[in-house]
Amino acid sequence: MEEFTGERVIPGEVDPDLWNEHLARYAFAARLAPGQRVLDAGCGSGYGAARLAACARYVVGLDIAPGAVQSAGRRYRAPNLRLLAGDCRRLPFPKASFELVVAFEVIEHLVEWEKLLGEARRVLTRSGLLVVSTPNRLYYAESRKTANPFHVHEFDYQEFCGALAGYFPHVRMLLENHAEGVLFSAPSADGLEIAAQQETPRRPAEPSTAHFFVALCSPSPLEDSPAFLYLPPAGNVLRERERHIALLADELKQKDQWLDESKSSLDQLHQTHQALERESAEDRRRAEETVRGLEEENLRKTEWCQQVEAEVARLKGIVEKLQTELAEQTQWALKLDAERSEILANYQRLEEETNRLRGDLTACVEQLHRTEADVSERTAWAQSLDRQVAQLTADLNALYGSPAYRLGRRLGLAPTPASDPKWGKAHD
């Protein structure tokens, strides 16, 4: 069996009032179902589809939760009952498949609720009927402390009428409310006679205070129908009230016990409070002493701050003086930088001139080396000539001094060169 979470009604898992609200709708729809093909859109746990199958030609129950459909299939079985998992916004049936479609407490769970109405219109026959219900947003906004987390769009009366009229040309709105009554019945009674009080004129129903809206929608005109009263099988209101009173009495007893415990806790808290007050008084005394000490410390710090301020003023004067000097030095540095730039430019020109002279000097040195080589070579050649001259001179001197030469000259056979030292004397 499914666990009740508040999203759908589970038989045996909800209180009688909620259970009877849902059963009443299916009892109302069962009056319209005999011999009809019926679709229960959003069948939930299947109890309503089973109720309709007791009188309809056949019933198809459709729900988007496969787990709910499987649980309903295990619990409710009938030859004319079929339970399917599917989406009410995309019904898996051809056109005109049903004479009656019921959709109880489904539309407020859908973001695209318009598709449910469009699909219901599509699968209905020309004279078919849609019975759709939803809670009154105005009533539930006042009666509930928190919103239903499974509802994504609730309707008030006018909005619901307008939404249905957009898809069905004929709409009749009914208001579903709990009504008190007193029942006289024998154990074997099988009928019901309803007597309304005649002394007081019946007031018209007020849509804004209704608990639920139940609408009959059809492509064809609708006939008038009298009010419908559902008497629950467990309709002994007095017994239910007595049970409720007993539960309230148990709750009151439990609350009295909680109150006694709260009083005891309050006494303990009072004693604790008194102890804390004494501790607080002692803390205040110590705090006052601390404050006095802090005030004295603050006075000393104030004097120190004044001294610091004077020192700051003095240092500020020094800083201003240093800033003036810095400005002057900055101007001097800028001047030096300009001079440095000029010197650097001159240096670059000198370096270029030096490189040029160095090249010329290198060429001169090379030329000097070549000249020195030539001088050395010519010196060696001159020295060689000197040696040859000296040798020739020696040879001539030897020749001139030889007896053969003297004899030949005397005989006139040898020439007398001008280099002969004796030639000059003889010539003279």
Image (tube, rainbow, N blue to C red):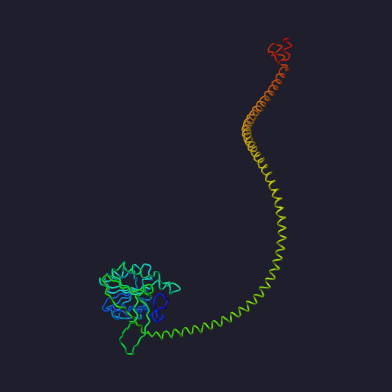
Q: In this view, does 73 lie above or below 410?
A: below
Q: In which quarter of the image is the C terminus?
A: top right
Q: Disc count in the image? A: 0
Q: Residue furthest top?
A: 428
Q: Is residue 174 above or below residue 395?
A: below
Rendered location of residue 62, percent (x, y):
33, 74
Left or right, residue 281 beside residue 256: right
Rendered location of residue 123, percent (x, y):
28, 70
Kindly identify the residue that appears in the image at 47 percent across and 83 percent down.
Answer: 248
Kindly identify the residue that appears in the image at 70 percent across and 54 percent down.
Answer: 309
Q: Quadrant of residue 410?
A: top right
Q: In which quarter of the image is the N terminus?
A: bottom left
Left or right, residue 354 beside residue 109: right
Judge by depth and name the residue closer to the eye, 211 or 100: 211
Residue 73 visible from this viewpoint: no
Judge by depth and name the residue closer to the eye, 283 or 143: 143
Q: Is residue 286 above or below residue 335?
A: below
